[in-house]
Image (cartoon, helix red, strand yellow):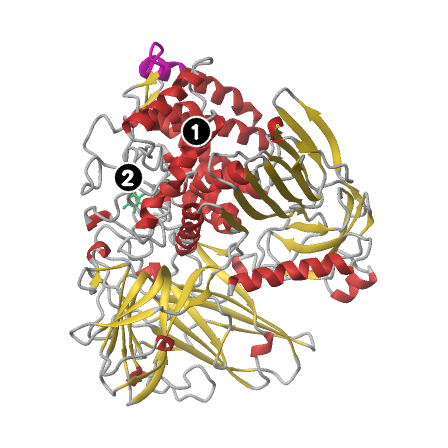
Amino acid sequence: MKHTIFLIGILVTLLLVGCQGKHPTVIAPKVEMQENPQGIATLTPRFSWQIISNEPDLVQQSYRIQVAQTEEDLAKEQNLLWDSGDVKSDQSILIPYEGSELRSKGIYYWRVKVNTNQGAAKWSKPQFWTMALLNDSEWQAQWIGEDSLSNPNETAEGNTRLAARYLRKPFGTKDSKIKRATLYISGLGMYEAFLNGKRISEDVFAPTVSWYPNRVYYNVYEVTPLIQQGNNLLGVKLGNGRFFGMRGGETMVFGLPRLLAQLEIQYADGSTDVIVSDESWKVTSKGPIIANNEYDGEEYDARLELNGWDTPNYDDSSWKPVDIMENPKGKLTAQPNPNLRIQEEIQPIKITKLPDGKFILDMGQNMVGWVRINNLNGKKDQPITLRFAELLNPDSTLYTANLRSAKVTNIYIPAKDGTFSWEPSFVYHGFRYVEVSGLDYQPELSNFTGRVLYDKMTTTGQFETSNEIINRVFKNAYWGIRGNYRGMPTDCPQRDERHGWLGDRATGCFGEAFVFDNALLYGKWVQDIEDSQSPEGSISVVSPRYWTIYNDDVTWPAAYFYAMNMLYRQFGDVEPIKKHYPSMKRYLERIQQVSMQDYIITKDTYGDWCMPPESQELIHSKDPARKTAGPILSTTMYYSLLNLMSDFARLTGNEQDIAGYQDLAAKIKEAYNNRYFDADSAKYDNNTVTANMLSLRLGLVPEGYEQRVFENIVQKTEVDFNGHVSTGVLGIQQLMRGLTQYGNVDLAYKIATNDTYPSWGYMVRKGATTIWELWNGDTADPAMNSGNHVMLLGDLLIWYYEDLAGIKNAAESIAYKKLLMEPKFPKGLTHVKATYNSVYGEIKSEWTKENDAFTWDIVIPANTSALVRLPKDLNISVPTQKGVRKVTETDSHIEIELGSGTYHLSSKS
Ligand code: BGC
């Protein structure tokens, strides 16, 4: 399916290019990085577009943007709110609106036209965006719900149990024609809304998660087609989500679910109606979803179905008037990131019958989401139970030991004999296997559909090589990453955890950004991190801080800074850095106050987490020779944060801070080397790969010693670990790039393609279809052993793209405006084919190298350029086509500057 969509995408692009004649064309116009978004909260939304052309070397010379309140005005160029005029600039991403002031709830139409060195493009087709409800005073709605536990099995203790709340509001419309209807809605933990029996959107688990005491997100949907003249019904189902769904004790429960909804109807005669959540609504918790909890599952009693509850003519006399609920306090904020959606479906590949009559489905893939039942035959009152797990025991029963207290059980109770179809609304699972019980007969594969759930976003990267292990690991990473996008990047999707652990994503987020358009997700997550920060500046290593953990260490909080750097470097978005600069600064100061002694950052909590232990049963190594001292990790990472912060200060007009950061960094470097570096042996402390690699890659090694430190890394890896990885989640963030940068891509390649323990290939050989939490995930204690964590990927995906494919930002470039294409050629690798759909358009690199024959196909998007760098001994013939701007030869390399276009390079035959 995905591939078909991808191919269709390519065909459409080709057609577009083919049909356009000689003129360049503007495509993919976006506002705040989305197509036609609804509910924009900034008064200066930013515009981006791409250009395609069938001529090479396209450079945009100027642009012109127009904005109006109606499509007609836009077409006639009248009453324009903004006409940028011709702006001489090659900027085509994130250009801020500069017109007259935008209104709360407004709808705006816009278009863009560009002039290029190949002539002018026509106006883009008109696009639109709508504004959010910008002023708190415009909210007339109240929070409503059912403020008591009224069902026998409901409990707020331990594994919480709560029935879904159903809320309804009949309303009528005026006689006048309906021009437009917009719903502003939030429901905590999650809502599903219906107008006259129809879902208002395919979004699920809405709104996105947040730290509710500080911030509550709401969504905006245009619902005009769902409203009818006369009687209407707005119905909402509420699930627990993260609001009520957490266990008591150390985790947070915020109270019972609640709804805030405001439906605004505009009529053709200029009048309006506003339907709001208030005391006039009715509620029941006696519906079919008798329990729902993200960890434990959903129980659905079809005998309690409320047929037609979401349509106008339903008799709700047995329902109660709603309770007015306490305002959850957090600032109501228009949600900037898309909600989750089902984005793919897969079928099970096998069904096995167990001796006790239960069935085991094998989905063929460790996936995240749920299973939909299609036309199963049920018996009245006889529950069908589905349980989920990542693995099977040797006797083919479900292996659930690694799920901890999560019960992951969905139950459906049929109301009558006969076929039924069903899927849950408010729970998800991480699983490959499903146990089905309660059936009297052998079901078919087609009775079940795996529904793959994650944040709505596009896949931006494809990657394939001549090495099968690399291909498989990429695929496993692809499944693992998307399965852990749940409005925040989670650690895992299956056990009773599923939190936004910072450390797991510090460098990983950058690798992920090649494969998924994750800008809005991470942009929102860095807000969660700030919202979870303590007044003293501490960062919670789980954010949103459903577990509040202020360690005042560095390695996990570093993800806050690294993610913002990723957003800037990968997508060109500097706004998060501007917005969170004061918060980052507070954190850096806090660390100086509480964790720094004599310029060494002393506090560290997790060490080089999940490094391969000496014995395969252990979770964490006990061997001091393998472990890296905490202060080495925190001091090197803190040093990298100071350097990043100097860049951030420059980018945000905080130049006055730079000297302070640099001065402190210099003192830290000196103290660190005095304490941990032995100049005679060029080793750091106990000479772990992690200690040496972090010092090297993060820039702490005294000048002139780099190569010797590097030799220690190679020596240690080759001799002590037989060419295998020896790092945990810290060292792995720099390992692959570090080995390559300092000249041993062959060792990096060996590590990438090993299939013996410990390695990613070992996971593959042991049947993994995602990435494990532990290198020894097949043998370690189940207490901490998820089959779907992505933190051990470290910088692997970055290495795939930057070093193997040669798709990399040039030093000062952001968002691939200028590429440095310098693939590396490890021995044994003969083919790499990678695409990355950057904000400027699709970048492609496909090379083949067998013996002396080398070919390389490159695509560089319009309005960008590339510096291609290849070793001279490849003996390539330099193409003479248009777009080749300059050729330079050094002793060892040939460098070619290319404008946009498609190029074929090959060695001279
Ligand atoms: C989580 C990790 C996390 C770690 C930190 C684990 O339980 O699953 O991914 O980073 O704890 O201690």
- The percent coordinates of residue 669 (x first, y second) are 41, 17
Q: Amino acid at mark 2?
A: Cys
Q: What residue occupies the far left of the structure in this picture?
A: 356
Left or right for 172, reference 780: right
Give SS at disc 1.
Answer: helix
Q: Which residue is mark 2?
A: 610
Q: Are marks 2 and 1 in contact (CB under 8 Å)?
A: no
Residue 447 at x, y = what percent? 36, 77
Residue located at (51% from left, 48% from top): 463
Q: Secondary structure at mark 2?
A: loop
Is residue 594 visible from the viewing direction of this image?
Answer: no
- Please say whether residue 516 is one of the residues in the magenta stretch: no
Q: Earlier in the sequence, mark 2 or mark 1?
A: 2
Which label lies toward us, 2 or 1?
1
- What residue appears at the point 65 percent right and 27 percent down from the top-left corner? 894
Report x, y in % for residue 147.
30, 69
Q: On residue 739, which mark appears?
A: 1
Which quadrant would the C terminus be assigned to in this image?
A: top right
In this orientation, which residue lies closer to the viewer: 635 or 905? 905
Give left or right: position of 200 versus 891.
left
Nearest to the observer: residue 437 or residue 635: 437
Q: Is residue 597 left or right of residue 846?
A: left
Please tell me how crowded label 2 is: few (under 14), some (14-19), or many (20+) other residues with Cα within 10 Å. many
Q: Which residues are magenta?
A: 670-682
Quadrant in the rendering for residue 878: top right
Residue 52 or residue 468, whichever sits in front: 468
Residue 278 visible, this orientation: yes
Of residues 298 and 130, which is closer to you in this image?
Answer: 298
Callout 1: few (<14), some (14-19), or many (20+) C-alpha neighbours within 10 Å?
many
